[in-house]
Image (cartoon, rainbow, N blue to C red):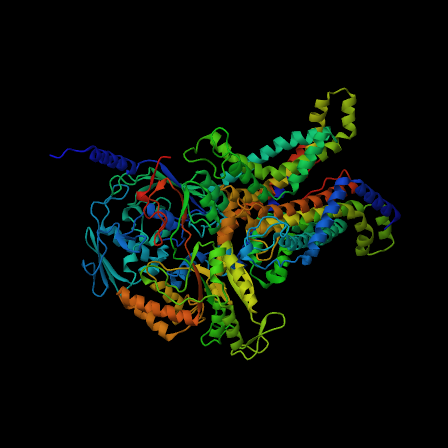
Amino acid sequence: MSGYVLRRLGEAIPLLAIVSLLVFALLQASPGNPLAQLERDPTVSQDDIRRIAEQRGLLDPFPVQYLRWAGGAVRGDFGESLQTGRPVATEIAERLPNTVVLVLTAFAVTLLIAIPVGVASAVRQYSVFDHVVTALAFMGQSIPIFWFGLLLILVFYVGLSNPLTGGALFPAGGMYSSGLQADLANRLWHLVLPVAMLCSTWVAWYTRFLRASMLEVLSQDFVRTARAKGASERVVIYRHALKNGALPLITLIGLDLPMIFSGALFTETIFAWPGMGRLFYQSALRRDYPVLMAIVMFTSALILISNLLADLAYAWFDPRIKYT
Amino acid sequence: MARIGPRLVLMLVLLLGLGAVLAQQRGGTATILMPEDLATMNPYATTALITMQVVPALLEPLVGVDPDGAYYPILAREVPTPANGGVADEGRTITWRLKEGVTWSDGTPFTSDDVVFTAEAAAAGEGGSVRAGAFGGIASITALDDYTVEVRYQEYDASYLDQFQWGILPRHATGDPAAMSSWGFARAPVGTGPFVLEAWRTGDRIVMARNEAFREDGKPYLDGLEFLVVPSEETRSAMMQRGDAQVMLWPGPQLRTVWEETPGVTLDSAPEIWVLRMFLNLGERGNPTEGQAPHPILGDVRVRQALALGIDYDLIIDELAEGRVLRARSPFELGWYRCDVDAYAYDPGRAASLLDEAGWAMGDDGVRVAQGAPYAADGTRLALDMTGYTDFRLLEQTELVIADLWGDLGIETSVRNVEQSVLFGGWSDRAARKTGEFDILVYDTGAGINPQLHVFELLHSSRIPREQNEGAGGNYARWSNPRVDDLLELAGRTPGLDERREAYCEIAEIVNEELPHLYLYQFAGGNAYAERLENFHTSTWAGLVWNVADWWLATE
Amino acid sequence: MSGADLSSWRAALRKFARNRLALVGMIAFVVIAVAVASADLSPYDPAATNLRARFEGPSLQHPFGTDDLGRDTLTRVLYGGRISLLVGVLVMALSVVVGTVVGGLAGYYRGAVDSVLMRCTDLFLSLPSLFVLIVLSTLLMDTPFARAYGGTLMIVTIVAALSWMVVARIVRSSFLSIRERDFVEAARASGASGVRIMAMHVLPNALGPIFVQATLQVAVAIIAESGLSYLGFGIQPPTATWGNMLKDAQTYMTRYPWLAVFPGLMIFVTVMSVNAIGDGARDAFDPRRSVSRH
């Protein structure tokens, strides 16, 4: 098994290298001036702009620029942001925790809802409950996430009011209210709407997935055997069926976890959440190449690691699978 | 002794009461909503507009400009003028006398050495200063004593009062002038301003607290300021409506009715320096060389005039921008240099006949074709492309409405917007602006209280971006007029404001006739604020926080 | 196709027809498609501005109201639908074709071919799709390629470039199992060429899962295009698409909500109907197979 892991990790490295070259080339070829801000101001001379471009290595030929970046990257130095001059690692490190909080909370909520609801829906197949769940899940899969976020603000911030205080029912943005940085309750309150938005499609997908998976498992022989042996329905469902039904979910989570980082981009923009997705979006608009490269490489690495972890988890759950 | 009548007593009581009510209340924090975060707090390291909306609460300049356009002293004791000896030697020697007893927020005394340091650091281009060009004309700067600075220019520089407009930097809290890009100051500035930086959470908020060492006793009235970064405009306006914030920076014109419907929130608008204009390419597309041919369509002034006559300005200003912009007719619309130019009015009839005269006959499909036009081969369609930048709804709407109006005249316009980073590209990016690969550009730009640099860049023939000068210059219209060149040079070396204004107004007339630029409107958007934030005023000439020391929050 | 295949197709079709949700989805999709195809019938020009008729609410004259430039929203929604549906279908076609070729070759020939093709697939799979879409969009946005057909060609290409991989994987695993079947052995024994065998014998039997995934690709593509346009990296105004109409409407959402409701609703309903068809297809072909949506 450890040989398998090492091999996978070993394969990941050239893969990441190719990704970095590909993305770097795409960014270099893109039109758009990272120093456009300076061009906008007619009192800044062209000489100044050229000098600054030179200082930041923007006028060097492509191979030179790439090798400089790559050389730094392997040592953990991803350069400086063209916008702020600060190390890229700092820019990302400041925002990554915010995205992680958002994403992990959303994931936790998703599983907390999807698993019980999906299982219950499968067990009570064709009941009213099942139909309602299926319909809702169906809608959740199809709704555009950014539209949903705007609707959430419209309803829960603009529309409804807190019956006790008369203020907003939920805040429209930010991670915490002024002065309440350390207040957990306040932070949770601020998390509600963004998490609801981020979860919306995921809950729908996972509920349906789990339902389908459970249905398949529940019809299998070993379940009937367990029932015949007199095990309670509860044990049958949760111990025997769920373990098998949840298995494909592991792979799905492994594939999805990095995806949710990009999905968080919409959430972070609409809810003023200072996270990595929003950093990417702003950096893309301003052609802040070092930041863009670092974020893409980070997410790529995340994808590869998540896939590996998902495969390993799959093997752990299902002893029939062996990796060499 | 006259009896003190009850009426007098009543008046006294009322006066006292009024005084108590009007007295500014200390305390409270004002929350300000901004669309994006600052990149750095060092105003010499960036030209991002948002910087000067926030940093002047911390860093102060020597003089400021009030909403009426008049200079007033801030860290200087008085505004240097020829009368008080501050301006001598035909404007080439400026003597700044500084206020005494002012300290930086950390207690260190503010002296003339800091001013000298500021000039040193700003001029050190290799260190990362983006303002080196503005300090390039200084021949020498010396501290005559602790509170007097003498600045000598190589030649008369019309913007001498604005020299230090971005603020004075403290020598002791920054670092090596040649290493500006590595200063910790960028994230933790120390200034003389009414507030000090308490915390800056990147991408989230900037928190400021009262500077207890501020030079004006009793001010600022507010305990603190909080600048929140909220990218979504809808969220910002929702927060204002809910009273969760007191100031919203630069609300879009479409929100005007929102403020009208919200009690306690008002819009404070003032004309802005930003003027939306079209740059018409008078030269051959994509051939940025000396002696290029004229543009086949736009090279003919009659066509350009027809374009100007074909725009229904009132429709755009009243209906589209909902009266939130003002008609602009020249680059000189504000302040002391305001010129009155005979603006073009919407006259599609005359526009059509001008086009006929210019040799563009109406074609079968409603688009004109050349028939004896001076620069275009017969059969060429009157098709133009219009390029602006994305993510600015009003700009896009303006372009589309104009394209529609021109369509009635037989002009086929295709509107294509690109990202700002693409539109404002440099020569090395082969940006369309620089290489002339465009027909019409539409975007906003503007000058400050001192328009000389700005209009010189835009209108002088030496500033046409060419292969030969590696694309330097802002004369994107590729317009060359010797009289205007002379007038620009004259305005640049004349200290007298009246003479300069005369020169500018003549330039405005010529521009209006030859139309290298087509002026549309001037923004007057302003800022939205909660009425209980007293003394909040939007100034045309300064950023959001120009008078933040005077703001106070009335209790609800 | 052998006789066995034909009857399994018929069985699948029958099963599909009995699925009410799928039928409703099919009908809805057809209705939408017909509506957008007949956008020309509208008396309004989607680009004609009319500032005196701005922000009118839904009425008989303007069933979906008018927008900030006085343009009829229904007309723009229909024209926008053309683009959204076209993008959806073209992305599906392109990604399915590319995915089938890559997956098919990998699954049939195995060995070195499989290795190389799967490494390629893995490479693309390790790219964070939204981020790379944004980068590709900035790369191509200002080129003549992007301006062709109002930007549709560019969007289709970049979205397809990042969504063919899942099809490849499905096709590969299908081909891997089908190639072991008897009739394929027989065809090989009779000396038929690889390509012929793949096209005539293996592929027809793999069509089930491909079809299911194809319908999901349409939904994914429509959401991808609208998401990109919402961010400003998709098809640029003034060309109307549901995504950029939603972006423009956002500014006026509190006061003129119908501007955001209708385009959003269209995306919603279209995607739902496509998903319904996909669901029905999945149940029809193989109720036990779980299909990935990536």
Q: Is B125 displayed left or right of A233 in the figure?
A: left
Task: Looking at the picture, tell me which residue is in the foreground, B61 or A248.
Answer: B61
Estimate the x, y position of residue B490 in percent, counting from the top left.
30, 70
Residue A32 visible somewhere in the drawing: no
Q: Quadrant of the C terminus of chain C?
A: top right
For residue C265, what is the image quadrant?
A: top right
Q: Is C215 displayed left or right of B266 in the figure?
A: right
Residue A240 visible somewhere in the drawing: yes
Estimate the x, y position of residue B383 in percent, counting from the top left.
56, 69
Estimate the x, y position of residue A290 in percent, counting from the top left.
49, 51
Image: B443 above or below C203: below
Estimate the x, y position of residue B545 in percent, counting from the top left.
35, 47
Q: Is B19 displayed left or right of B4 in the figure?
A: right
- Which residue ends up furthest to the left in the rendered image? B1
For residue A206, what is the image quadrant?
A: top right
The total number of labels drawn is 0
Image: A213 above or below A280: above
Image: C30 above or below B7: below
Residue at image location 73% in from the left, 41% down from the top: C279
Residue at image location 46% in from the left, 38% down from the top: B242
Residue at image location 59% in from the left, 41% down from the top: A148
Task: Looking at the picture, tell me which residue is in the foreground, B410 or B116.
Answer: B410
Task: Looking at the picture, tell me which residue is in the foreground, A78 or C191.
Answer: A78
Task: Looking at the picture, tell me which residue is in the foreground, C16 or C178.
Answer: C16
